[in-house]
Image (spheres, rainbow, N blue to C red):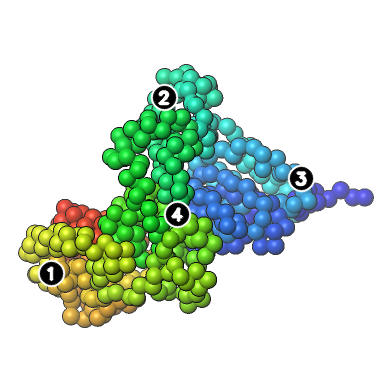
């Protein structure tokens, strides 16, 4: 029988998958292959069934069934994949070895070369293809001190009940205790001891929010502390109040089923929800929520609002009550019909404080609302007076520059636009849409001839790309150097906490956000 070297490679192949922001790509659709993926650029998630793994640039991961690549990156998500048939044992070892992090500049050229050689017929090209695959695997399984440190950190997170000594951790990393502590602090920002305390406090919060009826003693034991009184003192020292007070924040267990951040309203009323919506592709660096909510929602189960809500995931949090707004996707409207007795339906409201008042009424917290509204109103008036000389001269337009479109916003029926035009005194261009937004071309933006332009929520790369067009330089606001581009990625004034955060940042940074984009 004649030997054919193609038989060596026919059960394996490589591919490059490109996933744009907010989209996904299904891989291994029939489940016939195992695979190794390498993240060449961007960040995202690998979803297999109900399991989700975060994907980080420079890292490799193994999968064994049909999966979905989800981009959470504002840049194009590049993923190289090595597939091998389940019947092939050549690469089976990858499932049981530690995969090293390698910078894309070092390994991406090899992936590209392998792709160019794939499917070639000559012996030399087939041998070169196989050689590159094994060279890649050699690099991706090469241990380093960085990988050892990552493994130690992950192990500490996953085994908080174990007593850790710096000398033993250092030995695992083949370092002396002083060098290890220095390297650990450089990587994490705090010492190993402080990191362990921080992680134990974080998990304690999760346990108190997610486990109905759990005691302080049980929480302490589950995070490796035998003395509940020491735990209580430590918790109060780090958080600012004792665990008994923290537990009362979620005493009535509230789940939010909405595509709005109603958790902002709840937190302002002193209540932490057991479940709340998140947008992992929009807020990819802070767990799917604006950064200002991150600290106060430790322990809350974050529900992916970019896809249909799963009733089982919500009910696993054992909510006493569910606050639900109308959802955008018609097929998910009846998602909780079997638990209708627990659901409080909240209709669409035009203003942020109408949601606050409705939620406060449902939860009998009306006494807190007036003070919250008064504080926000005082802040709005202060910022309006501060910016009045700038906002009253000339007419304004607000745009969001996205990867493949420009959105021109109207002047009402949107929390942020109402804040700008109704509360802070910005003078709207007469030809803006009345409400919502419309997608326009750069030529239409030029034709608008606004005096001043405010760019919100946009990625720098997309804005600079737009600014390279010849049409951009013809805009009146650009010619007059009246383009403002503040760091607004976390601005969401639909709730009192987000509104307050935005107003403070707006007052401090807006006048400095003027940029020359030409």
Does any portion of residue 55 appear in the rendered image?
yes
Q: Is residue 499 above or below residue 220?
A: below
Q: CA distance from mark 1 to mark 3?
A: 68 Å
Mark 2 touches mark 4? (CB < 8 Å)? no
Which badge, 3 or 2, is on the more N-terminal residue? 3
Q: CA distance from mark 2 to mark 1?
A: 53 Å
* Disc number for residue 181: 2
Classify mark 3: residues with Cα within 10 Å, few (<14), some (14-19) or many (20+): few
Mark 1 vs mark 3: in front: 1
Does any portion of residue 445 appear in the rendered image?
no
Mark 3 vs mark 2: in front: 2
Residue depicted at 49% across the width and 65% down the height: 309
Label 4 sits on residue: 301
Element at badge 1? loop
Label 1 sits on residue: 425
Q: Nearer the viewer, residue 517 or 53?
A: 53
Mark 1 touches mark 4? (CB < 8 Å)? no
Residue 240 horizontal side relative to residue 159, left or right: left
Mark 2 vs mark 4: in front: 4
From the top left corner, tell me how far across and down residue 145 is, in percent: 51, 29
From the top left corner, tell me how far across and down residue 321 is, in percent: 41, 63
Image quarter where the C terminus lies is: bottom left
Mark 3 touches mark 2? (CB < 8 Å)? no
Element at badge 3? loop
Residue depicted at 34% across the width and 59% down the height: 263
Which badge, 2 or 1, is on the more N-terminal residue? 2
Label 3 sits on residue: 89
Q: Nearer the viewer, residue 181 or 270?
A: 270
Which badge, 2 or 4, is on the more N-terminal residue? 2
């Amino acid at each position: 029988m004649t030997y054919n070297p193609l038989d060596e490679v026919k059960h394996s192949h490589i591919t490059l998958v490109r996933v744009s922001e907010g989209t996904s790509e299904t891989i291994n659709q029939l489940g016939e292959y195992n695979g190794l993926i390498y993240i060449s650029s961007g960040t995202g998630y690998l979803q297999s069934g109900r399991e989700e793994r975060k994907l980080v640039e420079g890292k490799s991961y193994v999968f064994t069934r049909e999966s979905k690549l989800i981009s959470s990156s504002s840049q194009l998500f590049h993923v190289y994949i090595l597939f091998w048939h389940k019947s092939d044992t050549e690469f089976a070892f990858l499932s049981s070895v530690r995969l090293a992090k390698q910078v894309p500049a070092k390994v991406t050229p090899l992936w590209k070369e392998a792709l160019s050689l794939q499917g070639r017929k000559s012996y030399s090209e087939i041998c070169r293809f196989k050689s590159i695959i094994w060279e890649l695997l050699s690099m991706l399984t090469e241990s380093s001190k960085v990988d050892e440190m990552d493994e130690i950190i992950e192990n500490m997170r996953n085994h908080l009940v174990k007593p850790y000594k710096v000398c033993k951790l250092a030995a695992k990393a083949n370092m002396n205790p002083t060098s290890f502590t220095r390297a650990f602090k450089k990587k994490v920002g705090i010492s190993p001891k402080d990191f362990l305390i921080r992680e134990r406090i974080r998990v304690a919060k999760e346990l108190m929010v997610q486990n109905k009826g759990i005691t302080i003693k049980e929480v302490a034991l589950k995070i490796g502390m035998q003395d509940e009184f020491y735990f209580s003192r430590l918790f109060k020292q780090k958080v600012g109040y004792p665990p008994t007070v923290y537990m009362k924040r979620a005493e009535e267990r509230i789940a939010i089923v909405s595509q709005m951040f109603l958790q902002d309203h709840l937190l302002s009323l002193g209540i932490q929800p057991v479940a709340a919506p998140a947008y992992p592709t929009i807020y990819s660096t802070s767990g799917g929520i604006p950064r200002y909510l991150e600290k106060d929602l430790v322990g809350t189960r974050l529900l992916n609002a970019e896809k249909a809500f799963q009733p089982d995931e919500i009910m696993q949090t054992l909510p006493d009550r569910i606050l639900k707004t109308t959802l955008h996707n018609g097929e998910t409207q009846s998602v909780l019909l079997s638990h209708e007795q627990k659901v409080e339906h909240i209709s669409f409201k035009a203003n942020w404080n109408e949601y606050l008042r409705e939620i406060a009424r449902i939860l009998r917290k009306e006494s807190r609302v007036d003070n919250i509204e008064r504080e926000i109103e005082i802040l709005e008036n202060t910022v309006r007076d501060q910016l009045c000389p700038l906002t009253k001269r000339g007419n304004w337009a607000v745009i969001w520059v996205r990867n493949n479109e420009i959105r021109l916003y109207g002047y009402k029926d949107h929390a942020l636009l109402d804040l700008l035009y109704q509360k802070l005194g910005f003078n709207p261009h007469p030809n803006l849409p009345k409400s919502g937004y419309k997608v326009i071309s750069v030529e239409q933006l030029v034709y608008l001839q606004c005096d001043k332009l405010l760019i919100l929520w946009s990625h720098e790369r997309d804005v600079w790309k737009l600014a390279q067009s010849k049409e951009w330089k013809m805009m009146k606001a650009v010619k007059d150097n009246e383009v403002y581009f503040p760091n607004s990625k976390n601005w969401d004034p639909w709730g009192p906490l987000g509104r307050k955060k935005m107003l403070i940042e707006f007052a401090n940074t807006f006048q400095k956000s003027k940029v020359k984009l030409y």
